[in-house]
Image (cartoon, rainbow, N blue to C red):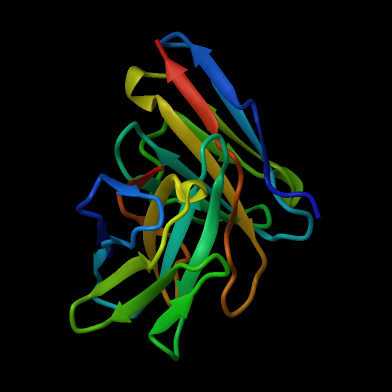
Amino acid sequence: EAGVTQFPSHSVIEKGQTVTLRCDPISGHDNLYWYRRVMGKEIKFLLHFVKESKQDESGMPNNRFLAERTGGTYSTLKVQPAELEDSGVYFCASGRTGFYNEQFFGPGTRLTVL
Amino acid sequence: AQSVTQLDSQVPVFEEAPVELRCNYSSSVSVYLFWYVQYPNQGLQLLLKYLSGSTLVESINGFEAEFNKSQTSFHLRKPSVHISDTAEYFCAVRENTGFQKLVFGTGTRLLVSP
């Protein structure tokens, strides 16, 4: 079975521009998560979808970040406008629903804001 | 809320030597505990987990971790490391009910040299 995929693998943009990150979860996984790692710091939770609904968005830093999961399949994370502090690696993970649903991570998107 | 502390940002070790990567956590509720590994240029992979039962858990590649509730620790150990174990290791926790977000430590980079 194919793993979690993320696109692009790298993105370099200038401050004030808009960037959209995409995550394709493992087929059949209802749960989709976004995390971010700013350089040298811990990986931080951003939000959690169950199908197309936002279950927990407590980690979203501010309203410049917009996450969507139309149709309950792939998800996008848009940053508009991007700021310097948004630089980091954005990870997506997916998992099944159940007693313990392991989260399977994608390779991440490295975002650099200049 | 939960927090995870990994005091060692980098651990250099010679091949075939033993290693311990330390992880302490704080939580007001019961948690599940995890170790994830990130090899160079790859995504996060689950190495091992503690959900319940035996406090000693093992991975398929020789790592083990022991859940110590009184010391709120979940240290990762391997009696003899290989060059291929060079990677970054992340300790994480999540509530065992309710919200599924993982809370990560800052990571420990294990550097194995010949």
Give x and y (percent) for residue A32: 61, 53
Q: How many marks?
A: 0
Residue at the image position 40 percent from the left and 57 percent from the top: B16
Which quarter of the figure is the C terminus of chain A placed in?
top left
Q: Nearer the viewer, residue A52 or B69?
A: B69
Give x and y (percent) for residue B26: 22, 68
Residue A7 vs residue B107: left or right? right
Residue B29 figure quarter: bottom left
Q: Nearer the viewer, residue A71 or B47?
A: B47
Q: Is residue B5 visible?
A: yes
Residue at the image position 36 percent from the left and 59 percent from the top: B91
Q: Nearer the viewer, residue B106 or B100?
A: B106
Residue B24 figure quarter: bottom left
Give x and y (percent) for residue A86: 39, 26
Residue at the image position 50 percent from the left and 36 percent from the top: A90
Please determine whether, in this image, residue B50 is positioned above or below residue A60.
Answer: below
Which quarter of the figure is the N terminus of chain A placed in?
bottom right
Residue at the image position 44 percent from the left and 86 percent from the top: B52
Q: Nearer the viewer, residue A53 or A88?
A: A88
Residue A74 vs residue A19: left or right? right
Please determine whether, in this image, residue B22 is positioned above or below residue A26.
Answer: below
